């Protein structure tokens, strides 16, 4: 299940980048993040699949910014998982 969630998450990230790039080409609109809500829900599901709660997702985003770093390809999936597990502890 965790791998399926990461596949969905990666697909959503890719779709969002493609959509934002297209919008930027055809207009002056930049980064509307139409998929942001579903991406956030998927992040929360990933945290819950490791036994965490919404409070853990908040902690990950407030103190490590790990999901953002993953979305920007600054860290690997393995590093993201490591951070999630450490915070859920």
Image (cartoon, helix red, strand yellow):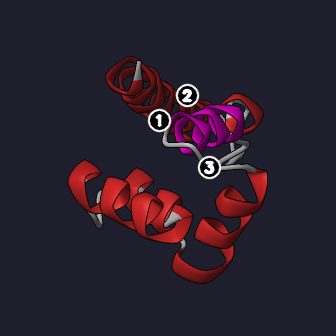
Q: Is 44 situated left or right of 64 in this image?
A: right
Q: Residues within 10 Å of mark 3 (few under 14, many from 20)?
A: some
Please identify the dominant SS of the magenta region: helix
Residue at 56% over, 45% down: 47
Q: Which range is magenta?
A: 39-49
Q: Which image quadrant: the N terminus?
A: top left
Q: Is 11 situated left or right of 24 in this image?
A: left
How far apart in space, not on screen, are marks 2 and 1 (Cα)? 10 Å
Q: Is residue 11 above or below residue 74?
A: above
Q: Where on the picture, by quarter, is residue 19?
A: top right
Specify the label residue 52 is tagged with: 3
Specify the label residue 13 is tagged with: 1
Query: Do tag 1 and tag 3 residues touch (Cβ < 8 Å)?
Result: no
Foreground residue among 65 and 14: 65
Which comes sooner in the sequence, label 2 or label 1?
1
Which residue is labeled 2 in the image? 19
How far apart in space, not on screen, are marks 1 and 3 (Cα)? 22 Å
């Amino acid at each position: 299940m965790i791998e399926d969630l990461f596949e969905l998450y990666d697909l959503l990230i890719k779709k969002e980048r493609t959509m934002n790039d297209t919008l930027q080409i055809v207009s002056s609109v930049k980064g509307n993040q139409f998929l942001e809500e579903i991406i956030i829900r998927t992040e929360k599901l990933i945290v819950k699949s490791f036994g965490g709660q919404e409070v853990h997702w908040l902690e990950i985003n407030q103190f490590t910014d790990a999901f953002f770093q993953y979305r920007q390809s600054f860290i690997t999936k393995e590093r993201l998982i490591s951070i999630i597990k450490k915070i859920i502890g």
